[in-house]
Amino acid sequence: MDPATKLGCSTTLSLDLSVGPTSFSIVDASASIMEEKLNKLTEENRRLHEMLSTMSANYDALHNQLLDLMRAPPSKRGTASPAIERKRESPDSDCPVDDSSEDSYKRFRVDSKSIISRISFRTDPSETSLVVKDGYQWRKYGQKVTRDNPSPRAYFRCSYAPSCPVKKKVQRSVEDRSMLVATYEGEHNHKPPIQGEGLGRPNRGSASSPSSGSLTSFNQKMTVDLTEERKEANVSRRSCEEIASPRLHKVVAEQMAASLVKDPDFRASLANAIFGRDFLHSPAQN
DNA sequence: CGGGTTTGACCAGCGC
DNA sequence: GCGCTGGTCAAACCCG
Ligand SMILES: [Zn+2]
């Protein structure tokens, strides 16, 4: 694939050179700009590579955790499996074998309480326990210490009024202090307030701005990806791995989105890359 | 002064 | 009924 890339690059260069003879200075400036862009893109590529490495490590850790959880017998959930908690479950369904297979599922609470997704971030042990900037604005409303985990658990709620009932709990991992486990409940019904909108010119008069639209669609797609998860605890262990793959994909996507949103340089580069050339060419025409 | 964080109090399940 | 524990409330406090 390297030759192909080189070929494409050289083709582009030759194309630019062909335009050269008409006005040399413009080509020179264009080449300089292009080189600068190339440098920026290279830097960005390196950063993305680093992010990918981090995400890969995170994925590996999650996968290990998942395998461990699947191996652990569901009956004992003492200190062996501190990370998982099935959240509230129907209180009587813990021992269905006890009284035959009676139809005592009357109090089967509607399992569509909310979508619960648990993702884990890798952050520094210093700037954690603060508002985790994942693209949304959160308001902390509580903090408790749990018994199994010495580190406290923070309770957050979406800053948007009761219109958005999304909540999340953030707690460090038991042993790895650099891991934050965030449990999201619900789904946002509004656009993420991308704070620090330092983009040079979001849009002027146009119906849709390129950068904003792109980011929005990306986030929405990411949100839609985690539809409703009502997988009960009775899931077979064999199929557990199967359903794990798409979910972990979602995890990776969310982490990538969070990382990208957190990085202001990336937004600047993205904006520059998306309509930077357009900006450069528009005034020339006018 | 408005909004967010802190932090102790309060409450609801749940096991014994 | 009682104590434990997770989840929430809200008053106090902090900060721009
Ligand atoms: Zn929200």
Image (tube, coloured by chain):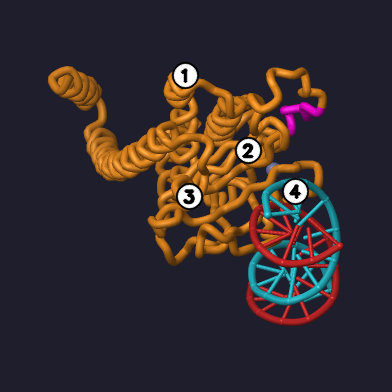
Chain colours: A orange, B cyan, C red
Same chain check for tags 2 and 4: yes
Residue A241 drawn at (x, y percent): 42, 24
Disc 4 beta carbon < 8 A from ligand 1? yes
Q: Quadrant of residue A106?
A: top right
Residue to which mark 1 is pinned: A239
Residue A209 drawn at (x, y percent): 59, 33
Residue to which mark 2 is pinned: A204
Main secondary structure of the magenta stretch: loop
Q: Any magenta on residue A66? A: no
- Counting residues from the N terminus, which is met first, the one under dot 4 or under dot 1? 4
Q: Residue at x 69, y 20 (%)?
A: A100
Per the image, label 4 sits on a secondary structure element best described as loop
Gap in angstroms between the C-alphas marked 2 and 3: 25 Å
Magenta part of the chain: A107-113
Note whether residue A86 is visible. Answer: yes
Gap in angstroms between the C-alphas marked 2 and 4: 27 Å
Three-letter code, disc 3: Lys
Label count reads 4
Residue to which mark 3 is pinned: A262
Q: Residues within 10 Å of mark 2 (few under 14, many from 20)?
A: few
Q: Which numbered mark, 2 or 3, is in the foreground of this view?
A: 3
Three-letter code, disc 4: Tyr
Same chain check for tags 4 and 1: yes
Residue reaching furthest to the left: A3
Three-letter code, disc 2: Arg
Viewer-nearest residue: A23 or A172 = A172
Q: Residues within 10 Å of mark 3 (few under 14, many from 20)?
A: some
